[in-house]
Amino acid sequence: MKRLDNIKLHIGESENKLLEIARNTLKNPVGYFKILKKSLDARDKSNIFWVYSIAFTDKQSDEPEPCPERLENAPRIAIVGSGPAGLMCALRLTEHGVPVTIIERGEGVEERSVTTSNFFKNHKLNPQSNVQFGEGGAGTFSDGKLNTQTHDGFNRDVLKYFARFGAPEEILYLNKPHIGSDRLKRVLLNIRKFIESNGGEYLFNTQFVGFGEADDYSAKRLTSLILKNTKTGAQTEFKTDYAVLALGHSARDTFEMLDRSGVKMSPRDFAVGVRLEHLASQIGLAQYGKNYKLLPTADYKLVSHAHERTVFTFCMCPGGVVIPAASEEDGLTVNGMSDYARDGLNSNSALMVQMNSSDFGSDLFAGMRFQRSLEQRAFDVGGRMYAAPVQLYKDFAKDKISQNFGEISPTYAAGTNFAPLNEILPKIVIDALKAAIPDMGTRLKGFDAPDAILTGVETRFSSPVRIERRADFQSVSIDGLYPCGEGSGYSGGITSSAADGIRVAEKIYEKLKNHTIFIN
């Protein structure tokens, strides 16, 4: 096997040239060829090129994947939540021969898509199934980014799982891989089919609402979960000795129930802000120059220290839209979403200001109440019915209410109303945004465009609490309970949450294999 790195192809050159390079290097026919890495070098806008690493050999190679060790007669594991953490945990356990039951308060992705579209169009919120809750979690309605700042050893496994179940193969080698909301839904269906065909089951419209009583409660050992059908209200007891809590960052009522049940948690700092929307062509021209139309829709990532509070862009959606992301009635929060093609007229990103406990109080749920209060103010200031409050940047900078949109039209689906964002967000957040936007504009031309649209508010950056766990990943309070993923405060974003799910699955497998029989 040979490997070549730092191969440069200018934009417009065919990737067939890579195969030609491999053939010339081997001096023999190429039996196996693979792109290992692909990234864009746009530092010099007059000389933009793709940079590749490739592997090849003259022998045919199928690169067989290692077969996971499987267990026989393993107990059924409950997984609460079907976001990236819950699904990847379920996949890894299934491959180990461990049957799983996925408990999801929201709907399956087919029904969930209809419910969310109805909310966008008719402003009818289903608090149990929405952008935050349902199959795939909050990541289902996002850009589907798979890059991460963590260096977790399971990150590669996450990419392989997604590609295996229908994501584009390019995610395995692109420097900034993404799936897109449209393709991610198909991936979810394929994952579900695999899990169900291997003895797993999904319980949709089913909320985890409490714990069954143990024979010896002082032992603090999990024996069962109390589940409620969100459509009928009927409750059932689900017997299990092991449960994974992959709740997502918005399960506020579940966090409160866990606290009442004696599960130890701690408050976490987080960030709040707005969505900032530009023309995709404007960002493309700024990033790549006149050749931007020949390249993928441009993205960016910016940080500003112009104010005492750090301000940063997050969840940037090239060619995407701003969406209603509420999960509670009479509260408004927004998010961003892109399809795989990223071919919308606008691009947007969250513009977030780092907060800490001194801003809202240090008790366990102070941060959660703070988030909710901002969402309720945004709902009221926006004119209710989930219309979003918006300002043009030029007016936001001068504390003026905007009167008309400029060249950029908003993409937010539930309607917008011109309103002062300083009536919603704390003064320190407003001041930080006012300092950061022109500062970021010095590094990305047009970022501070006068008619850029600020849409409020973005509050679901991360979980406001952490469910404490031990080194073996079990809850410090209840044996057999495994907090996992973003909702438990141990990750952020699709890839790191998914990797945490795999990590938890391996911990459970290690525990089970000492008490079960191996099969080949």
Image (cartoon, rainbow, N blue to C red):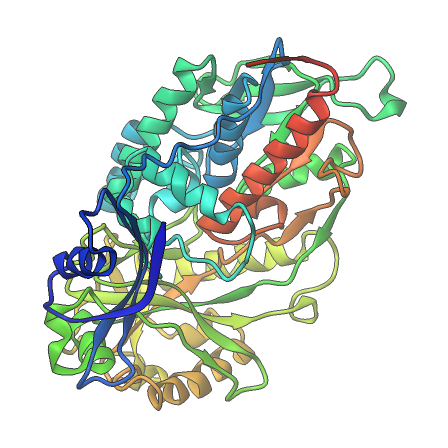
Quarter-of-image position of residue 508: top right
Q: Is residue 93 left or right of residue 260?
A: left
User: Where the C terminus falls, by quadrant?
Assistant: top right
Using the rendered image of the protein, determine whether residue 200 is visible from the camera's viewpoint: yes
Q: Is residue 220 left or right of residue 164?
A: right
The front one of 282 and 253 is: 282
Using the rendered image of the protein, determine whether residue 176 is visible from the camera's viewpoint: no
Q: What is the x, y in percent for residue 458?
A: 43, 61
Seen at 59% across and 60% down, the residue is 370
375 in relation to 427, above or below: above
Quarter-of-image position of residue 390: bottom left
360 in relation to 114, above or below: below
202 in relation to 40, above or below: above
Q: What is the x, y in percent for residue 70?
A: 57, 19
Quarter-of-image position of residue 39: bottom left
Seen at 26% across and 45% down, the residue is 58
Seen at 19% across and 64% down, the residue is 296
The front one of 473 and 13 is: 13
Q: What is the x, y in percent for residue 266?
A: 73, 51
